Amino acid sequence: MARLTAADRIRRVLAIVPWIVSNPGVEIAEVARRFGLDQDDLVDDLNVVWMVGIPPYTPDALVEVTIEDGRVWIHYADFFSRPLRLTPDQGLALLASTDGLLSVPGTDPEGPLVRALDKLRATLGGDGEQIVDVDLGSADPAILATMRENAANKTEVEIDYFSFNRDTHTTRRIAPWRVVAQEGAWYVEAWCHLAEAERLFRVDRVEAARPTGDATSHMPEGDAGESSTFSPSSNAPRVTLDLTPEASWVAETYPCERISVSGDGSQRISLAVSAKPWLERLLVRLGPRASVVDGEIDGTPAAEVGEEAARRILSRYSG
């Protein structure tokens, strides 16, 4: 089966449970299809749900899960009927964390979770746009479902992929292992035949996905734990940048190896660079809010990378 972290599994269960509650007696096979799961994996998840409750863990304090003749019912424990009292901070934290569940494939866009979030937003005194916006990328739901289904079935997919770091389009054959939401986007962890190695692909950069129907012989060995969206190699080029306070978002967005902050809020950061096009885009975007201290990439001093990219852009408009 595809590898999952505990966080992945909890997110999945929290999306599945309210849907089953609102569809009592639904067939296990239908739930599995809706959420892109193997039926055995789904039953394993449901067998955990019935242990959810509060002390003293008597029947009225536990969530009840009933599976009979290929169908499933979930009944909330009595404590779910009690009014929930939250401070504004708790309500905002709950809204932020729960809103991300709406991006889990199979979640009912008009179901009880959505209705509960709407009530919480109203109580907090504003609409969702004013309070919080949790968006796990713009991944195509059909492509996301394809990745999840093939990961569960251990079958391979041919994809058309845009590499943002290298500014290239490629067609690859991959064996998806798992789909995970990290840092505001959906990713698929897979074996890539083109690279002949394990790779992490952003699903919103997959332009097309074509299932091959072929079973894969490339499966992960054991459980490597949580994926990392970017893990620089030891020989990747490093650059050092000085950032104005307005550019502090860089240190919050990208994995930096060193950060020093001055009293006025400016920063000096050191970070690994995966490819020259990525650094070009970053420096052009930052403009005068960043200056290069040192570093070199592909034989070009990092200080010249942004300048060269800016000149190319200007030449297109002036020509």
Image (cartoon, grey):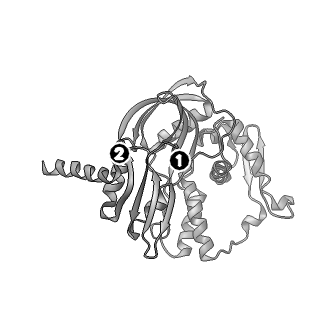
Residue at disc 2, secondary structure: helix
Whether residue 140 is visible: no
- Residue 277's disc number: 2
On screen, residue 306 versus residue 162, left or right, reads: left
- State the image coordinates of residue 281 (x, y, percent, origin top left): 34, 51
Amino acid found under the numbered disc labelled 1? Thr
Amino acid found under the numbered disc labelled 2? Pro
Residue for point 32% across, 45% down: 300
Query: In the rendered image, which quarter is residue 124 located in?
Result: bottom right
Q: Is residue 151 above or below residue 12?
A: above
Residue at disc 1, secondary structure: loop
Residue under label 1: 229
Q: Is residue 261 above or below residue 225?
A: below
On the rendered image, what quadrant is the N terminus found in? top right
Residue for point 54% across, 28% down: 156
Q: CA distance from mark 1 to mark 2?
A: 18 Å
Figure disc tally: 2
Closest to the observer: 290 or 201? Answer: 290
Closest to the observer: 127 or 98? Answer: 98
Residue for point 36% across, 45% down: 276
Closest to the observer: 294 or 291? Answer: 294
- State the image coordinates of residue 250 (x, y, percent, origin top left): 43, 60
- Circle 2: is it few (<14), some (14-19), or many (20+) Cα within 10 Å? some
- Circle 1: is it few (<14), some (14-19), or many (20+) Cα within 10 Å? some
On screen, residue 304 versus residue 80, left or right, reads: left
Label whose residue precedes the other's in the sequence (1 or 2): 1
On screen, residue 301 versus residue 39, left or right, reads: left
- Residue 104's disc number: none
- State the image coordinates of residue 314 (x, y, percent, origin top left): 19, 52
Whether residue 201 is visible: yes
